[in-house]
Image: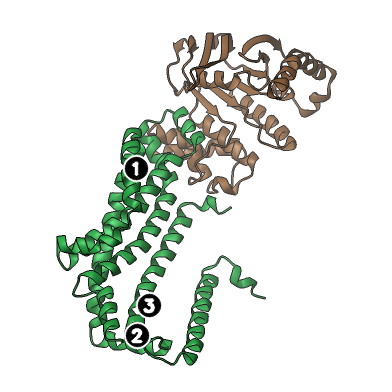
């Protein structure tokens, strides 16, 4: 297996207006192999969303480098696509137009864009909703559009920023299984950010645990559960054992984070 | 029992307008039964008769052409200029910081009070009307254009950037569509202001127009004619307001829910 994504010694410090600065990330080293599904979990404030934005090219690191397929990342590129937490869909465009947005921006011909959009609309279970507008859809449906839009540009790596955080628990479980089947079908490399440990374990080949303030890689846990995975697996002793192990690793962080906020 | 009137259909909204018009006319008619001094108030029927007379003798047409050409042309130009200034202010922080206070100062000056000056500078007729209307109508468009462009959703812009959008593409696919309903609401206010502007301009210096007709009718104590022309202006205001509001809804259907 070859490393498709390499994060090498990435630091990020935000300068505030009052000259003070906040260290969000320190010395992050991560590799993600081609076709792998990797999750990053951590308490809030562990800088995991910041890291994802650096990998996508939306933010510049203060130090260190990100390489995708050997090329250094300096800006957003066609080899990466991001699925955002908030539904960042254009409210004045239909589902079909939103899914094709990345291709439209890339100047692809209309007919081709529509055809590609159609394929991913079907894959994400949105068939029949092509001409709906985002405000006519439920939260879960909107996140499907978000996923389809990212897949449509055919990226090497799919970056998911807490994509199901805003959904209710039942919808989230359904979306997790759907994401798995989409991943199996599209064979994309996926890097997922989440604060839901069970989500990370259920979906991933590897879970990377972040510590908070500044975010550092605390530990990496390999998930050896067989695939394809089903929701029933969430109740197996192996699964629960993994949850327990990861929870113990970040419990302390979460508790100290709670104290900070008081 | 009046549920059907609350529905969001074209028929229901037409019925609502009809209902409120009839109510106002009825009240007016009742009040004019008690106020019998015809210098103070005339019943709606007399106003209608007076308007029909104005139509047949051609005065309504002459005045209408004068008012409509001036107000519409000036309104359109102020929309274009207003959007242009709003774009400039939104795209440059420096310009917004330096030009903003000047604009809001100009906006708070009652420009209407300068009408006699405009007439002195530009003479009686089209030019002074055009400039006065422009001065009052341009500001709401400037303000809402700048505000709308600055209001654009940050996550939407981030998503566009993530998909490699250029600055121009971010403007055309995110910022501008987002600002459009704001701009249209500014245009709606501008139209109402333009109508006030045109009447005042015509009061102070013109030979034709609804404002001119209202002034000359009131000087001959022809209350029916005064109200007839006021009715025409009201109708113009209403048509503009209803159509711009409809345009706003069409451009931003997601805001309703």
Q: CA distance from mark 3 to mark 1?
A: 37 Å
The mark found on residue A132 in the picture is none
The residue carrying pointer 3 sits among few (fewer than 14), some (14 to 19) or many (20 or more) residues within 10 Å by Cα, namely some
Q: Chain of mark 1?
A: B
* Chain B as rendered: colour: green
Q: Residue at x 38, y 68 (%)?
A: B237
Q: Does dot 1 land on a helix, a strand or a loop? A: helix
Q: List the residue tagged with mark 1.
A: B101
First of labels 3, 1 by sequence position: 1
In the image, residue A11 lies at what x, y percent?
A: 53, 11
The quadrant holding residue A27 is top right
Task: Give above or below for B38 relative to B84.
Answer: below
Colour approach in the figure: by chain
Observer-side mark, 2 or 3, equals: 2
Locate the N terminus of chain B by quadrant.
Answer: bottom right
Q: CA distance from mark 1 to mark 2?
A: 43 Å
């Amino acid at each position: 297996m070859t490393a498709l994504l390499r994060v090498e010694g990435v630091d990020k410090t935000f300068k505030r207006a009052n000259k003070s600065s906040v260290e969000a990330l320190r010395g992050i080293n991560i590799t993600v192999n081609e076709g792998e599904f990797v999750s990053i979990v951590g308490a809030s404030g562990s800088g995991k969303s910041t890291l994802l934005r650096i990998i996508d090219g939306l933010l510049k690191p203060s130090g260190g480098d990100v390489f995708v397929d050997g090329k250094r990342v300096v800006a957003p590129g066609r080899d990466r696509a991001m699925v955002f937490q908030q539904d960042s869909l254009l409210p004045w465009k239909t589902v079909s137009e939103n899914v094709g947005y990345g291709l439209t921006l890339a100047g692809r011909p209309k007919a081709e864009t529509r055809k590609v959009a159609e394929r991913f609309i079907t894959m994400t279970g949105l068939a029949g909703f092509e001409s709906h507008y985002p405000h006519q859809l439920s939260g879960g449906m909107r996140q499907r559009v978000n996923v389809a839009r990212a897949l449509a540009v055919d990226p090497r790596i799919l970056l998911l920023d807490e994509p199901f955080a805003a959904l209710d628990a039942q919808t989230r479980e359904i979306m997790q299984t759907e994401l798995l089947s989409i991943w199996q079908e599209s064979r994309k490399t996926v890097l997922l950010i989440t604060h839901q440990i069970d989500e990370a374990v259920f979906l991933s080949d590897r879970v990377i645990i972040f510590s908070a303030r500044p975010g550092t890689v605390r530990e990496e846990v390999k998930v050896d559960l067989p695939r394809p995975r089903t929701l029933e697996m969430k109740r197996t002793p192996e699964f629960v054992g993994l949850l327990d192990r990861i929870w113990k690793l970040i419990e302390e962080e979460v508790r100290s984070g709670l104290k900070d906020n008081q | 029992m009046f549920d059907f009137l609350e529905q969001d259909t074209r028929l229901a909204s037409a019925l609502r307008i009809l209902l409120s018009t009839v109510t106002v006319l009825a009240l007016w008619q009742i009040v004019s039964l008690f106020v019998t001094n015809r210098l103070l108030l005339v019943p709606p029927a007399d106003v209608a008769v007076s308007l029909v007379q104005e139509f047949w003798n051609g005065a309504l047409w002459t005045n209408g052409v004068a008012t409509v050409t001036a107000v519409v042309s000036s309104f359109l130009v102020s929309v274009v200029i207003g959007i242009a200034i709003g774009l400039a202010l939104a795209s440059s922080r420096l310009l917004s910081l330096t030009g903003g206070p000047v604009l809001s100062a100009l906006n708070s000056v009652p420009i209407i009070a300068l009408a006699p000056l405009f007439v002195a500078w530009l003479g009686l007729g089209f030019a002074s009307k055009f400039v006065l209307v422009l001065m009052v109508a341009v500001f709401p468009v400037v303000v809402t254009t700048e505000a709308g462009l600055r209001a654009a959703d940050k996550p939407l812009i981030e998503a566009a950037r993530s998909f490699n959008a250029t600055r121009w593409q971010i403007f055309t696919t995110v910022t501008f569509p987002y600002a459009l309903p704001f701009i249209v609401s500014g245009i709606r206010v501008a139209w109402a202001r333009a109508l006030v502007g045109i009447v005042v301009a015509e009061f102070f210096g013109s030979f034709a127009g609804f404002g001119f007709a209202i002034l000359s009718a009131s000087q001959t104590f022809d209350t029916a004619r005064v109200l007839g022309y006021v009715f025409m202006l009201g109708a113009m205001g209403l048509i503009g307001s209803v159509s711009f509001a409809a345009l706003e809804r069409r451009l931003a259907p997601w805001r309703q829910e």
